[in-house]
Image (cartoon, rainbow, N blue to C red):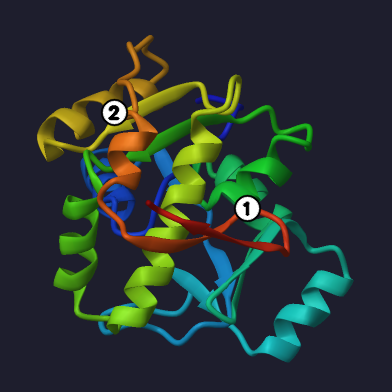
Amino acid sequence: MFARPLVVFGPSGVGKGTLIARLFGDHPDKFGFSVSHTTRQPRPGETDGKEYHFVSTDTFKALLADRAFIEHAQFSANFYGTSEQAIHAVRESGKRCVLDIDSQGVRQVKQTDLNPVCLFISPPDMDTLRRRLRGRGTDDDEAIQRRLAAALAEIEYARQPDTCDYLIVNDDLDRAYASLKDIAFGEDVESDVIPPLDVILDQIDHHTIIDGTDSVVQVPIN
């Protein structure tokens, strides 16, 4: 199979998990998921070792100190990290490794020798993303606003030159899945175009953009 892992990233609620789950369901012998570690609590239906390795903050920090992670990030007081062991385990099974991480993780993985293929999944607009986040029923309004702010940071990062190899706007699940499948199998796919950022910004009155570091930038929208 392919030596280069496929890195899929995009805002929370954009449909990454649904698309990846469909790919794995259709081709379980071809692709494997790199199971990340996290300190957040499991959501209903999630299983330890399947969606994530759910660990305590102390355990996560110990793994971090041991340099077990090739990438790690923090969001909403929770830590997330991908171990090198998880990627090698998928490779050794003869499958192509797929990673679902955020832009902080992408920056770190691109600095390794993994030479990943990076695919960004974009929402068609912020209203659609907001509805999807609310529809999950797992976050209050404040948490949703944080996720929307983080989404803008992800979109801005993806718009930078040479950030991603492919880009899919998830405005139609079947169309987006067809593109994802072709990319996963190494087909050359024409990327979509992210909607202009000013159009996206017009849909939010005020937000906080996390720039991928430890700093936070307040951005007023006139």
Q: Is residue 111 left or right of residue 165?
A: right
Q: How many marks?
A: 2
Q: Secondary structure at mark 2?
A: helix
In the displayed structure, 73 sits above or below 38; it is above
At a point 34% along the width and 29% down the height, the residue shown is 196
Which residue occupies the foreground of this view, 136 or 4? 136
- The mark closer to the camera, 2 or 1, is 1
Q: Is residue 85 left or right of residue 15?
A: right
Would you say residue 96 is visible in this rendering?
Answer: no
Residue furthest front as drawn: 222
Residue 170 point in image, percent of width and height:
22, 38
In the displayed structure, 137 sits above or below 146; it is below
In the displayed structure, 11 sits above or below 94; it is below
- First in residue order: circle 2 vs circle 1: 2
Residue 86 point in image, percent of width and height:
62, 56
**Mark 1 Cα-neighbour bin, 10 Å: few <14, some 14–19, many ≥20:** some
The residue type indicated by label 1 comes to Asp
Which residue occupies the foreground of this view, 4 or 218? 218
Residue 61 quadrant = bottom right
Residue 83 quadrant = bottom right
Q: Is residue 66 left or right of residue 63?
A: right
The residue type indicated by label 2 comes to Lys
Residue 146 point in image, percent of width and height:
43, 70
**Mark 2 Cα-neighbour bin, 10 Å: few <14, some 14–19, many ≥20:** some
Q: Secondary structure at mark 1?
A: loop
Cα separation between marks 2 and 1:
30 Å
Would you say residue 182 is visible in this rendering?
Answer: yes
The disc at residue 211 is: 1
Q: Is residue 7 left or right of residue 60?
A: left
The disc at residue 181 is: 2
